[in-house]
Image: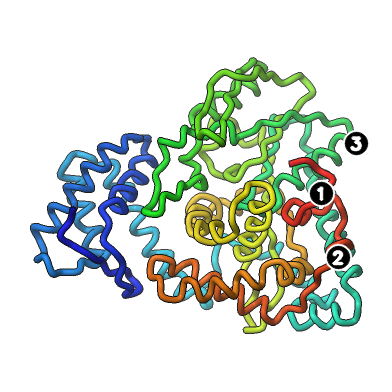
Amino acid sequence: MSKFKHAVKRSGAIVPFKEKRIANAIYRAAVAVGGRDKDIADKLANKVVVELERLFPADYTPHIEEIQDVVEKVLIKNGHTQVAKTYILYREENNRNRREKSRKDSHPSENIPWSKIWHIFDWAVSHNLHSVEALNKRIKKGEFPHIVHESEAAYEEDITTAAENIAQRSKELKMVFVSGPSSSGKTTTTIKLEQHLNKIGLKFKAFVVDNYFLDLEMHPTDEFGDYDFETPQALDLAMINDHIKKLCDGKEIKIPFYDFKTGARHLNRTAMKLKKNEILLIDSLHGLYPQMSESIPDEYKFKVYIEPLLQMKGPDGRFIRWTDLRMIRRMLRDAAHRAYNPRQTLEHWHYVRSSEIRHIIPFINTTDFIINSAMPYEIALYKAKLFTEFKTWTKRYKDDPLREDALIRATRVFDLLNKVEAVEDDSPVPADSVLREFIGRSVFEY
């Protein structure tokens, strides 16, 4: 056991010093370069602790930057130069993200699809749905069903346009990716796209990426025992590339099966082969990630990106964050279909967001078409479904430095929902709405 009892975070918060956190950070860097040995990561973490104890007295509280400096030195000293390089790059990337976050108001991000955003904002203004205040006024006038109809129509228009674009390139395409961050509505959108394209004679075969997860024991965990499934390194990218290449070449493969109950993958389970008139349809969180399909030329791929790109200002005058909408969606979906407590979703969300920033957002502008899955009316339903929970969480995490991220998110959403006019009756929402993927009672099977 280390002689250090606490460590200092960048925010200044004092948290328990845990060697396991160091081991996980090392293991994550190792995974990024193909390493999967947790024992080596544990041994290197122990060497880091020994070096820290040599450098600092027993009553010292090391800062996170000091700990990371030692990690880099230990990795290089012990011959793990590639892991050290990845660790250093991740560290610099995180520092750069923090700097950019502090100056984002004056430096627009290159990763935001500004043209699409402007179109959505213009639509929101013309429908008087550009602010929570405007939404509340329409709801109080009894216009909720009309708001639902207008919102769903805009989403359907995006689906139709995407299908038309795919159809124009159908003769050369080998696969269509439907990608987007967690709870953006990929599954429903994939179903709807396929319905549109089937009407014009195009045939698809689904490729289920979830079957390519590596065994659970190969994933890193944090001090809370929480697994990170959000990173593309959780998938067997080499096998995915090999299999989709063979499928595109007309060969038969045997896809694996991943058992989420046991956390184990079983190889060579189901035979699969594309017919001459079939296109591979891939619904994946990381469809834009280059290594997901690096074996396939770009001209054979069509990439659809989905995100709830809501353009609505909250009571504080700032635009509502898309990540908060998706977090709420996932809370409702996981609670209904995966027996996962909404609080667990909140506590896990930092993994989700961290992976998005690193592995999804940088590639948004490589997509062929963007679909907006945001429904301006959805926050009114969330007020009725989860407001009490968010109020509880703002108190639960108030004095817990280890849950600083959860507190920030819970407080922000609570402040937003506190000003929203609640709607308890979701019956105006169509049974085939993308929102039904999360609030339940969809006509589609997920």
The Cα–Cα distance between marks 2 and 1, rounded to whole angstroms, is: 15 Å
Badge 2: residue crowd in 10 Å (few <14, some 14–19, many ≥20): some
Under mark 2, the amino acid is Val
**Which residue is located at x 26 percent, y 61 percent?**
17
| Vertical comparison of 73 with 198: above or below | below
Task: State which mark lies toward you, 3 or 2.
Answer: 2
| Vertical comparison of 117 with 260: above or below | below
Q: What element carries label 1?
A: loop
**Can you tell which mark lies on residue 199?**
3
Residue 216 position, x and y percent, is 46, 36
Under mark 1, the amino acid is Ser
Does label 2 or label 1 sit earlier along the sequence? Answer: 2
Residue 73 position, x and y percent, is 18, 51
Judging by the rendered image, the residue that carries numbered circle 1 is: 442
Task: State which mark lies toward you, 1 or 3.
Answer: 1
Judging by the rendered image, the residue that carries numbered circle 2 is: 148
Badge 1: residue crowd in 10 Å (few <14, some 14–19, many ≥20): some
